[in-house]
Amino acid sequence: MGTFLRATVMVLLVGVLVAAQFLRADSWFPLGSLGQYAYPRDPDGDVINTYVMGTTTTGAEVRVGLTPASAGISRVEFEVQLPKILADPDLLGDIVEVWETNHRPHELVSVTVYENHSPMSGGALAADPYDVPLLTWSTE
């Protein structure tokens, strides 16, 4: 019976891992999408995190969370599509529409895409992180 139980648990765990890969379920960390671990990083390079800030009709600055539940797209998917978005900023319209639907009563008048750079040296933070604005898009 012990062997059967161990085999069952192993099959279930492998099943969850495989399902998380196909569902791209980042919220299942550490069993979610493992693509972030697929490539080595330069210990003396920059760690770059992309994020989006929005300005509401009241002038408030809000973070547009890049998750499927918040904006209909994950940060990883956003970063993959970033060259297309930079070439055609109107693609941000769909993301803004989903975000506004999920965050009523907020309405955005513009969004700005940023990259946060963390300079590394020997795998440790070498300098203060800094932001680089990539584009600002008006919803009007």
Image (cartoon, rainbow, N blue to C red):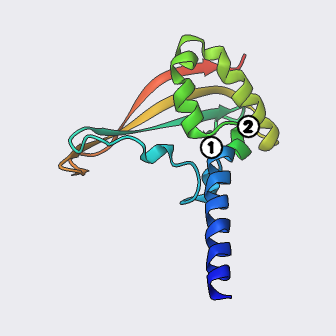
- Residue 138 found in image quarter: top right
**Element type at marker 1?**
loop
- Residue 56 found in image quarter: top right
Pick the front one: 26 or 112: 26
Q: CA distance from mark 2 to mark 1?
A: 8 Å
| Image position of 136 with respect to 25: above or below | above
Quadrant holding the N terminus = bottom right
| Image position of 58 with respect to 6: above or below | above
Residue type at tag 1 = Gly
Q: Residues within 10 Å of mark 1 (few under 14, many from 20)?
A: some
Q: Residues within 10 Å of mark 2 (few under 14, many from 20)?
A: many
Q: Position of residue 28 (x, y in %)?
A: 62, 58
Q: Position of residue 115 (x, y in %)?
A: 43, 33
Residue type at tag 2 = Trp
The answer to the question of whether label 2 and label 1 lie on touching residues, with beta carbons closer than 8 A, is yes
Pick the front one: 19 or 133: 19
Q: Position of residue 111 (x, y in %)?
A: 61, 28
Pick the front one: 93 or 110: 93
Q: Position of residue 112 (x, y in %)?
A: 55, 27
Task: Judge left or right: residue 65 versus residue 42.
Answer: right
Quadrant holding the C terminus = top right
Which residue carries the number 2 mark? 99
Of labels 2 and 1, earlier in sequence is 1
Q: Residue drawn at (53%, 24%), measured in percent from left and top? A: 82
Which residue carries the number 1 mark? 65
Pick the front one: 50 or 16: 16
Residue sitting at the far bottom:
1
Q: Residue drawn at (66%, 15%), measured in percent from left and top? A: 90
